[in-house]
Image (cartoon, rainbow, N blue to C red):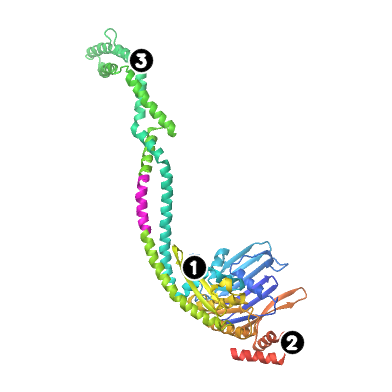
Amino acid sequence: MLRSLVIRNFVLIDNLDIQFDKGLSVITGETGAGKSIILGALSLVLGQRADGKSIRQGVEKCVIEAEFDIAAYQLSPFFQENDLEYDEESCILRRELFSSGKSRAFVNDSPVSLTLIKELGNQLIDIHSQHQNLLLNDSHFQLKVVDLMAQNQELLTTYQQQYTAFQALKREINSLQERSALSRQEEDYLRFQLEQFQEVQLKKGEQELLEEEQEILSHAEEIKGGLYKIAGLLNGDDQGSILSLKEALTISTSLERYYPRAKEIKERLQTAYIDLNDLASETETLQDAVDFNPERLEWVNDRLHIIYSLQQKHHVSTVDDLLALQQEFEVKLEAIDSFDEQLTVLNKQLENCFNELKKDAVLLNRQRQKASKDISKELVEMVSQLGMPHARFHIEITPKEEPGAYGMDDIRFLFSANKNGELQPVAQTASGGEISRLMLCIKTMIAGFTALPTIIFDEVDTGVSGDIADKMGDIMQQLGKKMQVITISHLPQIAAKGKEHYLVYKEDTPERTITQIKQLEQDERIREIARMLSGATLTEASIANAKELLRWNN
């Protein structure tokens, strides 16, 4: 419930502080007095975008603050989710506009984005103005009305969860099909590359071994000659190192009896003799093993050429990199081969999901069909009291082949205000005044099914008068027993229905003209309703009439 609205330096307003109560409150005033300015200020604090003309000329800052009692709103999760201080007794929305063009928004003194304050504002107040009547032509609004009256919230939630899963499966299938199509395009390329790798049969570490063998085979004569020379130097018959070492070992052994240090010399010579003897034998073996083999060299060169060509082609530098590429090609081809299998599984899941979705859609359709009859009957009864005795109303529900976010139904409101008139979509047959009355009745009907404690009607009674205006006032008055209702009106019949009455007026000061608002006492209220009845000049008859209206309506 809106408790108060404080406005500072907004357009023609210097300083206003308005207190509101439960039930039906009426705001009246002459044309141009500033009623729309007050409504504009409230719209701003609820998140509407501002422009430079919003700030009163000559000031730096404009402040609009609205206080709400949100005990009935069940908004604790919203406040927790957005890390805001929660107090169900008092929620204060504040908007600050600056002459520089900047603006700030606050919820309970915490700075918030304009998007967040608008999201919260949509849950606090429904401002119904003339342009909102266009909603009556909107199929989504029409569907929402039917679902509210059918109490489909729980069923709709179940359906939408299933619909979300259905859409996710469709996206997954589309993505897989796109990947499959792209992969099919490169399948031949992948298979060709993989066949090349499989034909070569690369082995880990192969390149290093081949390059080493290539060096040996390419220099076989030099290696063999060098090893032969080493063997001769070590074990030659004339001057081999081993013979010299053997002679030195014999001498050191004979000296050992006379010279103790000779033992160490002998041991070291013995070690050297054994090592060189082994080295000589190994050198001779290696010499025999090294052979110039042009056929083997050609094979090694060809093999390395294949490896180098693959590395150059795929822009890598090692056999390990080539083996990794081979594995990658294998994985991609396995994925291509499995696409059909995956699509079969996903399509089966999609079919099952669609069947479940259709079951929920059928239940929604039944509820809507049932509710539509009650809605049409109740709405016709209400509008017939508002000057449309021959009105007919029908909700056309057409099945859709494909599921949507709200089911598989297309809904149209068909209307005729004239006797035997053809039922047509509301936008094509109803006048502005008729649409206003239809919207008032619809809002009244859904009031008991939605947690929207406050609704504001902005001159919804335009174009009506007399007994119809009185009936519209009755509807608003009854609506005010269920929720807080604030209506801006030019009609005395409606003004007299209000529990509270506010007058908007202009006041001239030495500097400028400003807009003011005040809550009327009983005598003031009588005079205001009398003015609405008779114009600027009050008469005893108009005052008596005003008293009578107030007596009957309060």
* Front residue of 297 and 306: 306
Is any atom of residue 395 visible in this view? yes
Given this view, does label 3 or label 2 mark the residue nearer the observer?
A: 2
Residue at the disc numbered 1:
78
Seen in the image, is 501 located left or right of residue 351? right
The part of the image, by quadrant, that contains residue 199 is top left
The x, y position of residue 411, in whole percent, is: 49, 69
* Front residue of 416 and 302: 416
Query: Disc 1 and disc 3: Cα gap in Å?
Result: 87 Å
Q: Above or below — where is 481 with respect to 138?
A: below
Looking at numbered disc 3 in the image, what kind of residue is underneath it? Glu
Q: Are marks 1 and 3 in contact (CB under 8 Å)?
A: no
Of callouts 1 and 3, which one flags the residue occurring earlier in the amino acid sequence?
1
Residue stretch rendered in magenta on the structure: 335-350
Looking at numbered disc 1 in the image, what kind of residue is underneath it? Phe
* Image quarter (top left, top right, bottom left or bottom right) of the N terminus: bottom right
Helix, strand or loop at label 1? It is: helix
Of callouts 3 and 2, which one flags the residue occurring earlier in the amino acid sequence?
3
Magenta-drawn stretch, dominant element (helix, strand or loop):
helix
Of callouts 2 and 1, which one flags the residue occurring earlier in the amino acid sequence?
1
The part of the image, by quadrant, that contains residue 102 is bottom right
Q: Residues within 10 Å of mark 1 (few under 14, many from 20)?
A: few
Given this view, does label 2 or label 1 mark the residue nearer the observer?
A: 2
Based on the picture, tell me whether residue 144 belongs to the magenta stretch.
no
* Image quarter (top left, top right, bottom left or bottom right) of the C terminus: bottom right
Image disc number at residue 537: 2
Residue at the disc numbered 3:
222
Residue at 35% x, 21% y is: 298
